[in-house]
Image (tube, grey):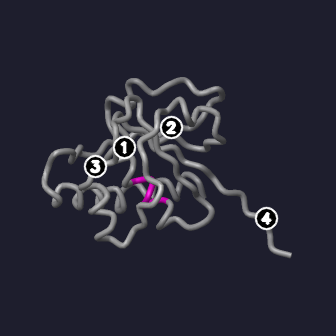
Amino acid sequence: MKDLIMTKTVLILCTGNSCRSQMAEALVNHDLGSNIHAISAGTHPGPKVAEGALEALRLASVPTDGLIPKNVDAVMHEPIDLVVTVCDNAKETCPIFPRPIPALHMPFHDPNGEPLESFTRVRDEIRAKLLPEIRKRLA
């Protein structure tokens, strides 16, 4: 019988939940395997995921199915093990969760409205800086 491995959940929080947090969610779920699961949300979510974010993920062969902006209220009662804020505004307006949850603030440039190269640069920074930190904290 296989050992039961507990999956850890990380919430990646941003303001609009349309660029950075969506890319981070997809990258965590793609790169960190079955032991760490990411969800993302926004304090003031936009109407859709930025096309540049989706294209940057596709260029890296990262699946984008199911990526939609969500309000943080929709995930408040999820079993979250770590909250990561990827913008200063989300850090300042991060809600109070029903139980204490460890938090990490790691801001990234907002590429919204910029050329695809900005999205790919932020994608690569998230992959290089944030993913190792999440792995370390949730290992």
Q: Which percent across, then down, holds residue 31?
A: 47, 67
Q: Does the magenta portion include 26?
A: yes
Q: Which amino acid does label 4 sit on?
A: Leu
Residue 4, label in figure: 4
CB contact under 8 Å: marks 1 and 2: no
Distance in Å between CA atoms under marks 1 and 2: 10 Å
Q: Which residue is drawn at 40% across and 24% down?
A: 93
Point out the frontmost of discs 1 and 3.
3
Q: Residue at x 66, y 29 (%)?
A: 99
Point out the frontmost of discs 4 and 3.
3
21 vs 54: above or below = above
Q: Which residue is drawn at 37% across and 41% down?
A: 17
- Image-quadrant location for residue 48: top left
Label 3: element kind = loop
Marks 4 and 3, the one that precedes in the sequence: 4
Q: Mark 2 points at which residue?
A: 103
Q: Mark 3 points at which residue?
A: 50
Outermost residue toward the right in this view: 1
Residue 106, label in figure: 1
- Image-quadrant location for residue 97: top right
Q: Which percent across, then down, holds residue 114?
A: 14, 49
Marks 4 and 1, the one that precedes in the sequence: 4
CB contact under 8 Å: marks 4 and 2: no
Distance in Å between CA atoms under marks 4 and 1: 31 Å
Marks 4 and 2, the one that precedes in the sequence: 4
Q: What residue type is labelled 2?
A: Ala
Magenta segment: 24-28
User: In the image, 30: left or right of 48?
Assistant: right
- Callout 4 environment at 10 Å: few (<14), some (14 to 19), or many (20+)? few
Specify the quadrant that holds the C terminus.
bottom right
User: Magenta: predominant secondary structure element?
Assistant: helix
